[in-house]
Image (tube, rainbow, N blue to C red):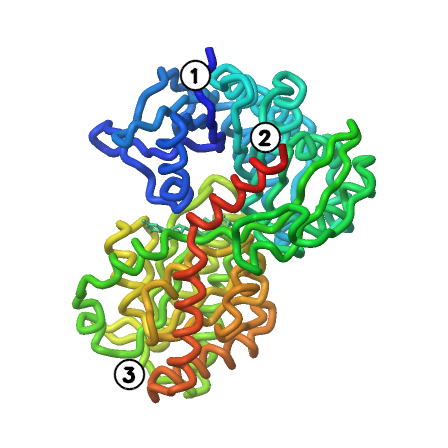
Amino acid sequence: MGGNSFVVVANRLPVDLDKDGNWQPSPGGLVTALSPVLMQHQGCWVGWPGMPDSDLEPFRTEDGILLHPVSLSQSDYELFYEGFSNATLWPLYHDLIVPPEFHRHWWEAYREVNLKFAEAVSNVSDQGATVWVQDYQLQLVPGILRQIRPDLKIGFFLHIPFPGAELYRQLPWREEIMRGLLGADVIGFHSVDNAKNFLALSEQIAGAAGSHIGQPDELETSGTPSIREITAWVTAPDGRSVGVAAFPISIDSQAVAKLAERPTDLKARLGNKTLILGVDRLDYTKGILQRLLAFEELLASGAISPQDVVFVQIATPSRERIDHYRKTRSEVEAAVGRINGLYGEVGAPVVHYIHRSVSKDILMGYYAAADVMLVTPFKDGMNLVAKEYVACHQDSGALVLSEFAGAAVELTEAYLTNPHDLESIKRQLHAAITDVESDSEDARQRMQLLHAQVMEHDVNLWATSFLNSLEKHR
Ligand code: GDG
């Protein structure tokens, strides 16, 4: 076996089956960032193809990337994916916005599926290959690989927040997961705070020792100050030294900005009103209801008028069989109906709600047309939507952004808000609307700074910084 010197492993393969049965590349930034590296290194991507009980042979994308499917059963999907990944880890890592559920049979499935992924990686990896493990669904993979393939160079990146030790310690399988992660050579997080949480916990519960936050050059990256801000070494229980650092993910900024240049008639179709936009997977972490409530209260008080503003919310379906997702959807849809019932006119709703996925082109058209972007998660690892909006605006528009999104660390010129405080969302939304309507110089300057930040720190910088760190670690 073997044959690959560079292997990415993620829960999902970077392709989706279209309605005609053809594989199409999935639109995410991760695929864009990693495709050149995979092509350059004769790379391979290991992941689940997206439908249970499929038994597919490895195949190549149009770009020549080898895809190695891992087969998951319906029961794996329910217990490992919907259960442990999305109803235990997801809420725990997002600071208990809803209570996580702890079930032993979900944990068993998580372990077995992680073993399956690790074995698949081991089978396709050359001696001494570099393996980059992605995200919370696969946290045991580094530890398993370390045992069965000690020759590999192993990196791990977490795409969601890493919570404080006080919360994390609730998890019955906390030691096993920490040891799994510590199997890596380098562990990357979006933010310094996430990395610090991990360091504290690794000392407390995994028997790791000697962790310290060092100087940037201890784990040199080719990045900019924001990327080099924290670097630390932690000594794993088996004596190996593991690098821990913040690598804030980003987007393919140039490509996004280019797509947004295409003209659309969206504003005209919406009556040339001030356009407020939300774009999210329909997830309880994203604070969609709170932003609708803030909008509703501003309408109720007369601070804004339905004659002048219109709100478009794109809420892509997500994890629809999980109870808390169903509840969130009903609450959001009830609010949309109520607000339109109170303030809309026939043929002119004040909230336009789209509960389906839209194409990348159309999405970029919405970003470009939007005067105010509302991004209000209670907790978010990074939030790429905020960065995509900013890439589409050189000096127009305004971003209202939750302090609890990882993106807030870099996008400090946004209208920052606390999504738990409705008055704070109302205040910042109103300020953003007023500033863009009056074409304020301050708002223009703020957007110029945000735009420059995102254009400079793109997803390629993220990937190369991480991989350089991993390379140097050895
Ligand atoms: C996780 C972390 C972290 C959305 N609707 C449509 C669509 N999208 C695209 C957006 C954006 C992506 O999906 C969403 O990314 P986010 O970062 O905003 O959020 P999560 O999905 O929760 O991602 C997050 C991220 O991983 C990366 O590390 O930033 O914190 O939770 O790219 O544009 N794309 C299309 N149609 C849609 O309807 N084509």
Residue at screen point 43% across, 73% down: 449
The vertical placement of 235 against 189, above or below, is: above
The number of numbered discs placed on residues in the rendered structure image is 3
The vertical placement of 474 against 394, above or below, is: above
As measured in the structure, the alpha-carbon distance from the residue carrying label 3 to the one carrying label 1 is: 62 Å
Query: Which residue bears the numbered disc 2?
Result: 154
The vertical placement of 418 against 49, above or below, is: below
Q: Residues within 10 Å of mark 2 (few under 14, many from 20)?
A: many
Left of 337 or right of it: where is 218?
A: right
Q: Counting residues from the N terminus, which is met first, the one under dot 3 or under dot 1?
A: 1
Cβ atoms at labels 2 and 1 below 8 Å apart: no
SS at circle 1:
loop
> Where residue 90 is drawn, which disc sits there?
none
SS at circle 3:
loop
Query: Which residue bears the numbered disc 3?
Result: 307
**Percent x, y of residue 422:** 56, 74
Query: Which residue bears the numbered disc 1?
Result: 3
As measured in the structure, the alpha-carbon distance from the residue carrying label 2 to the one carrying label 3 is: 56 Å
Looking at numbered disc 1 in the image, what kind of residue is underneath it? Gly
Query: Disc 3 or disc 1, which is closer to the eye?
Result: 1
Q: Residues within 10 Å of mark 3 (few under 14, many from 20)?
A: some
As measured in the structure, the alpha-carbon distance from the residue carrying label 2 to the one carrying label 1 is: 17 Å
Task: Please state which of residues 362 and 469 is positioned toward the viewer in this rendering.
Answer: 469
Q: Counting residues from the N terminus, which is met first, the one under dot 2 or under dot 3?
A: 2
Looking at numbered disc 2 in the image, what kind of residue is underneath it? Ile
